[in-house]
Every structure is written in structure tokens, then in C-alpha cells.
Image (cartoon, grey):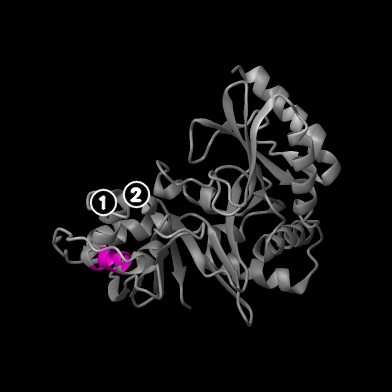
Amino acid sequence: MSMEVYEKIGENLNSIVKIKNYRVAPLYPKGKPGTNDKSVREFRLQLINKNDDTSQAVIDHLKMQLRKDTSLESVTFNSISPNSSKFPSYSFTFSGLKFDIIIARGANAGEKFEVRTVKTLDTYFKTRTDNETSEVVNMMSESYAPFANAEIVGAVQRTGSTKKEGVPIDKLGAIIGDIILTDNQGGEWYISLKDINGNTFSSYSGAASLFDREGNLQPNSAGATFLKTFGVDLNKVQAGFDERGNINKVRPKLAVPRANAREIEKIFNRAWGMNYFYVRRMRTGWKVFWLGKTKLDKLSQNIKIDDIRYPSSKSKQITILCSNTVEDYVIELRNSKAGEYPNDTKFKVKK
């Protein structure tokens, strides 16, 4: 199917959903290959006004519009899209090709906090009013002297890909940052903004490869390699899920590795990235620092494993507790789609 046809489909979708405060994501007006299933053409619908969640209205509207279109086959509503970790979708077949129309919902508390903060920052740099924003900006200036000398002229939300794969560590600030500040020389400064509940600082790929469809752990997968780096006993991981599923199989005994401090440091280097401001709202005040090489070393080096919690009849999550003198960390491997086996890895700070 040609790009012109995909573009026409995008235009038709826009004409259907605009009345319900939705549009096709401007970054991909012609859709794109499915995030998880590459045989599917994925179109992502986004709210126009993110603070007015009309997702249920557009779901109902699309149901009526898609099912009355006789050129579409196998129109199906998915409570969780096969190409998303949290959003619903409609899938159908058109001219022999499969499509997945994802319906992104309204902004969560963290996203709303981000939108408000961007507006506040942009106003502050134009008027220099607002004491709380002044406090944050002063903390940023104190944490990184070159920023103190920059004349900031605007603030916008960052859009685009959040994939870290293949990006050099010193360039990850542009991927991790939620907010871009622009100075009068055209320079860009990135802020990773967290609200009071924002203890997650990174995701990590590979968890979905840990098990096959039958629940057999794959010892040479990316997910297993990740766990072995932290000294996780894969036998206990398999046993925990077998217990949950009442699976009685004789499993091969796998060697239990020691934690690899050098590789753990590399993993945390990529998880944190560098060359951006970390700004988090705390219960009292703010936590602000510039994440340059010196700070990255402090956050990533000399990490020890404190505890490993394995899946059991009561939990399907693999949890690694680790720390150094600077931070206490929690790493969680879980299923973000309410399934059984892990498909997602999250890095969190406890402080």
C-alpha cells in the first residue's frame, strides 16, 4: 500500500475524530509500522486538548463509524492495544492489510504537572515573576555554572522519540528531557521533570524476551542477560512462575552468576544518561541537579545488591533492590499489560 493511501487514511481518521477532541499524531500523519507487530499499520490518536479527556466519547464514536464502513473487515476493540502498554485501540483489516488505531487517553497527573510547569517556566523567563519558579531556576544555576550565564528566552515541551537505543550517553539528555529551554544563542537545555510521585527515572528494554509463550525461561535472551548481570538466580525466577501457573516440569539447572559491578555501572550509565537537569517536586521544596559526568559517576558507580525478590504465588514481579552511597534503587521487571510474564523494566529511586 502506498504512502499516499496511508496519508488518505490519516486524513479520513482526522475528519472522523476531530469532533471528539482528537487527531492523528502530527509526528506520524501517515501512520507507521506497529510498535510491537510490524505487520500492522499503526495510527495513534491524540487528544487536542489534553486536559479534556474525551477518550470514551471517541471510543464510542469510532465504534459506530468503523462498523458502518463496509470496506473494513474484522473490526475489533482492544482494551489494551497490541502495540501499546496502556492504551486501547480498534483493529481492522482494509484491502488485505491490518491496521491498529490507538486511542491515547488524557494526561495523567505527571503529564498535567509537566504542562503547567512548561507554561510557568516560559512565562517566568519572559517576565521574571513567580517566586517558586525563581527558586527552581536558581537551584539549576547553582548546580551548573554555565547555565547561570545563559539568557533563557523560552520553554517548550519536548516531543518525539524516547528510545535510547543507539544514542551515545552524552546525547541522552535530548531524549530523556521533558522540557527544552532555549537561550538567546540558540542553545538548548534539557529538563527531566518529575512530580512528587515521580520516582521512576528510566525504562529498560529486553524484559519481554525472558520467557517464551509456553512459560519457558530463555537463558540466553536479553532479559536473562540483564538479570544475570545483577546476580539473579534464574532457577528461582522459573520456579516462581511455575508455581503461579501450576506447571510441573523438570527444568534444567542453570548456573547462578555473581553480580557484575562493571556491567551494572554501564547499565546505570544508560539508565540515567547525562547532560540535562533533573528536577523533581518533593514534599517540601525541590530536588535539582545537573547530570553531568561527575554526577553520573556518583549515581552509577559502586552499586551493591541489597536484596532480590522473586515471583511467587503472591507476586509475578521480579524486584532488585540495590544502592550506593548516593541513592537507593528499585528495579522492577513486571507485565505492564496485566499479563503474566514480564514485558517491562523500570528503574526507580527510593529517596
Image position, residue 251 (x, y; %) = 18, 59
Tell me if label 1 and label 2 are in contact, CB under 8 Å: yes
Left/right placement of residue 329 relative to residue 176 reads left
Image position, residue 201 (x, y; %) = 49, 63
Residue 67, picture quadrant: top right
Number of residue marks: 2
Residue closest to the far bottom: 284
Magenta range is 236-242
Relative depth, front residue between 77 and 40: 77
Image position, residue 234 (x, y; %) = 23, 63
SS label for mark 1: loop
Which residue is denoted by mark 2 in the rendering?
209
Label 2 crowd bin: few (<14), some (14–19), many (20+), radius 10 Å: some
Residue shown at 46%/57% (left/top)?
203
Residue shown at 27%/49% (left/top)?
221
Q: Which mark is residue 243?
A: none
Mark 1 / mark 2, whichever is N-terminal: 2
Amino acid found under the numbered disc labelled 1: Gln
Label 1 crowd bin: few (<14), some (14–19), many (20+), radius 10 Å: some
Q: Is residue 273 visible?
A: no
Which residue is denoted by mark 1 in the rendering?
218
Asked if the magenta segment contains residue 299, the reply would be no
Amino acid found under the numbered disc labelled 2: Ser
Residue shown at 63%/69% (left/top)?
195
Q: Is residue 160 visible?
A: yes
Left/right placement of residue 256 relative to residue 266 reads left
Residue closest to the far right: 19
Residue 27 lies, with reference to residue 194, above or below; the image says: above
Residue 326 lies, with reference to residue 83, above or below; the image says: below
Relative depth, front residue between 230 and 10: 10
Asked if the magenta segment contains residue 241, the reply would be yes
